[in-house]
Image (tube, rainbow, N blue to C red):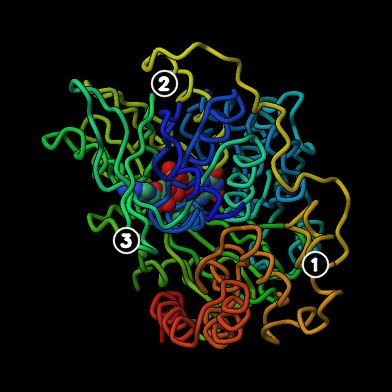
Amino acid sequence: MKRDTVLDQIEHTREPWDFLVIGGGATGLGVAVDAAGRGYRTLLVEQHDFAKGTSSRSTKLVHGGVRYLKQGNISLVLEALRERGLLCENAPHLVHHLEFIVPIYSWWEGPFYGIGMKIYDRLAGKLGLSPSRVLSREETLKLIPTLEPSGLQRGVSYYDGQFDDSRLAVNLAQTIFDLGGGAINYMPVVTLMKENDLIAGAVIRDLETGLEHQIRARAVINATGVFSDGVRKMDEPDAQTVIAASQGSHLVLPKAFLPGKSAVMVPNTPDGRVLFAVPWHDHVVVGTTDLGVDNITLEPVPMDEEIGFILTNAAKYLSKTPSRSDILSVYAGLRPLVKVGDAKSTAALSRDHTILISNAGLLTIAGGKWTTYRKMAQDAVEQAETMAGLEERPCKTEHLQIHGWTKQAIPEPSLGVYGADAPAIREIARKEPALAEKFHPDLPYIGAEVVWAVREEMARTVEDVLARRTRALLLGARASIEAAPRVAQLMAQELKRDGDWQKQTVQNFKEVAQGYLPPA
Ligand SMILES: Cc1cc2nc3c(=O)[nH]c(=O)nc-3n(C[C@H](O)[C@H](O)[C@H](O)COP(=O)(O)OP(=O)(O)OC[C@H]3O[C@@H](n4cnc5c(N)ncnc54)[C@H](O)[C@@H]3O)c2cc1C
């Protein structure tokens, strides 16, 4: 996946593209994979890096959504469970089955959640993971030794999927290339182009050179998440806003807080929210919150009250009480919820996806979740075919192997997420033994991963490598800041950049990483 190759195509393509997709998060990447899979000439443009927005900031679950079951939204759960099963098959190197334990502290919760999870199993049908079961107190504590034992009666175990969100995004971008399409980062859409009052393409700006290019396309898809209204207003300046952003934050803790293999799911905290504590890359991710926000930004920062809420509630369920000094990293993401009626809080807004088509023919797709990105994309492409008068072609993504697909176990822990690409990274490290070294003693990543990220995954800055190609920034904000100069040096060799570039990219990273440092 080479940025220069895509630039060359952009500069030399005179014929209109079939699909121009704006936004390189889960939604846009899914749409571009679907369109390229149907054989359409497809280009995706992302204003920053792939998954820089919400798509690298999730709870990392591929799930049907147990809480939507509680709300009675069966069709949403059914669709998500089906997509969960397909994603486990299509990206087995990135999606794993994970056991969740619901700790039961009052007598009525046991039968309530036990029956609920049986319904969840049933809805998954043939694509179900392992069946749910009710556990004794002893069995529960054996699986989660750090669970608060006082008052614990039993547990309910069920299975969902877990994944690495930004790695899936990178692999989807690579899949677009594998299917003959193109995707490019640091390339925002700055205006939309119209012919006879109909959308005919967009002007994009290369943030590395400042050059602008006109891209003509038959169908233009706005998949910009919480930024959707901004792009809609490029088409219709008076368009009503439809996006309500809801912030969700997470803390990352050392593994000692949840040493086993299973996750904890608290379906109803004392103030009515869901709390997860999930083992992830040998650490623990705890969250999340749901807070309506007006400030839409690419770098939301967790608020002090959110961190307090997560710590207080985690302390109720864990025997080892986490404190602020235990936190390795904090991160926040904005859910791109679509407003329906006059819902009073973002928690009441639909988690389903919405497609809007403007009079000029701009198709906007927003909402949904990572788990359902494939189905969202299928719906969007099918609507776009009709809108743009394209011939209808069959969807190919239901059983499409995503880039990196392999069922072979990868022995090195940090290389597992690369799947079928792992041997190529191993080979880089074999040829140059210095690259087999970790780039920071407290992080699991080696130099060869940096080289690979630049050569094959379109990493352009230190932040791309530390935040999204590897997950260093989430596993340890402080360690990542310390690692930044070494990463910049390795990248500069590959990209043929000078010392000034290294200083600048390290400085930019440090500014972003401040927002991930545990609060004092
Ligand atoms: C706290 C939290 C936890 C979550 N947990 C889960 C979970 O566990 N499982 C799950 O299934 N889902 C989860 N979700 C939901 C899921 O993460 C989102 O639904 C999904 O990532 C949204 O993807 P998107 O592509 O629509 O938006 P984004 O990922 O934000 O992508 C939009 C992209 O558009 C780009 N863009 C904006 N303007 C322009 C422009 N002018 N030109 C070019 N590009 C532009 C942005 O830079 C951005 O990268 C969670 C969400 C949150 C907030």
Tell me if label 2 and label 1 are in contact, CB under 8 Å. no
Residue 277 on image: x %, y %: 60, 61
Closer to the eye: label 1 or 3? 3
Tell us which disc is closer to us: 3 or 2. 3
Q: Of marks 3 and 2, which one's residue comes earlier in the chain?
A: 3
Amino acid type of the residue that numbered disc 1 sits on in the rendered structure: Pro
Give the mark nearer the N terminus: 2 vs 1. Answer: 2
Q: Amino acid at mark 3?
A: Gly
| Residue at screen point 25% across, 34% down | 193
**Residue 295 image-quadrant placement:** bottom left
Q: Quadrant of residue 86?
A: top right
Residue at mark 2: 384
Q: Which mark is residue 210?
A: 3
Residue on which disc 1 sits: 413
Which label's residue is closer to the chain start, 1 or 3? 3
Identify whether 9 is placed above or below 247: above
Local SS, label 3: loop
Considering depth in this image, is 90 or 454 the residue closer to the camera? 454
Secondary-structure class at tag 2: helix
- List x then y, in percent, for residue 430: 86, 74
